[in-house]
Amino acid sequence: MSCGEPHETDCSEVLDHLYEFLDKEMPDSDCTKFEVHFEECSPCLEKYGLEQAVKKLVKRCCGSDDVPTDLRSKVMGRIDLIRSGHPVPEQEIAPIVPATPAPQE
């Protein structure tokens, strides 16, 4: 994704490292570059706002639950696959919420 405008920090770099920015896992100098980019680029700012809202929602709903290490590894692996442009095989996609059984008649 790109807004089509030239920026000191490219949109693809910002989006590739968005979660590092959200999680405050990057150097202050990089954070500053991203903040400047968000001031200049409304599509990236919108994406940032959306991801920030999702992160807050997940924290509110699941913040007190411990995440198993293997689940975190699987999720991060899938995110890396998607970011690199590789499709995730259909059989590997499992529903996050168990399906509700149909009512009995």
Image (cartoon, grey):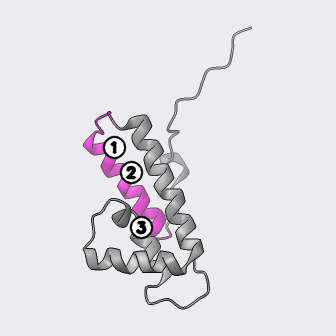
Task: Judge from the rendering whether residue 41 lies leftward or rightward of residue 81; answer left or right.
Answer: right
Residue at disc 1, secondary structure: helix
Q: Is residue 28 above or below residue 10?
A: above
Marks 3 and 1 close (CB-CB < 8 Å): no
Q: Which residue was labeled with disc 1?
A: 71
Q: Which residues are magenta?
A: 64-85
Q: Which residue was labeled with disc 2?
A: 75
Q: Amino acid at mark 1?
A: Leu
Residue 104, quarter of picture: top right
Q: Is the N terminus in the top left, top right, bottom left or bottom right quadrant?
A: bottom right
Task: Judge from the rendering whether residue 93 lies leftward or rightward of residue 3; answer left or right.
Answer: left
Q: Residue at x 49, y 75 (%)?
A: 38
Q: Amino acid at mark 3?
A: Leu
Q: Is residue 96 magenta?
A: no
Residue 43, quarter of picture: bottom right
Q: Is residue 42 above or below residue 5?
A: above
Q: Which residue was labeled with disc 3?
A: 18
Residue at disc 2, secondary structure: helix
Marks 1 and 2 close (CB-CB < 8 Å): yes
Closest to the observer, 33 or 84: 33
Q: Residue at x 74, y 8 (%)?
A: 105
Closest to the observer, 28 or 61: 28
Magenta region's main secondary structure? helix
Residue 66 location (% of width, % of height): 28, 36
Spatial separation of the CA atoms under disc 3 and disc 2: 16 Å
Q: Residues within 10 Å of mark 2 (few under 14, many from 20)?
A: few
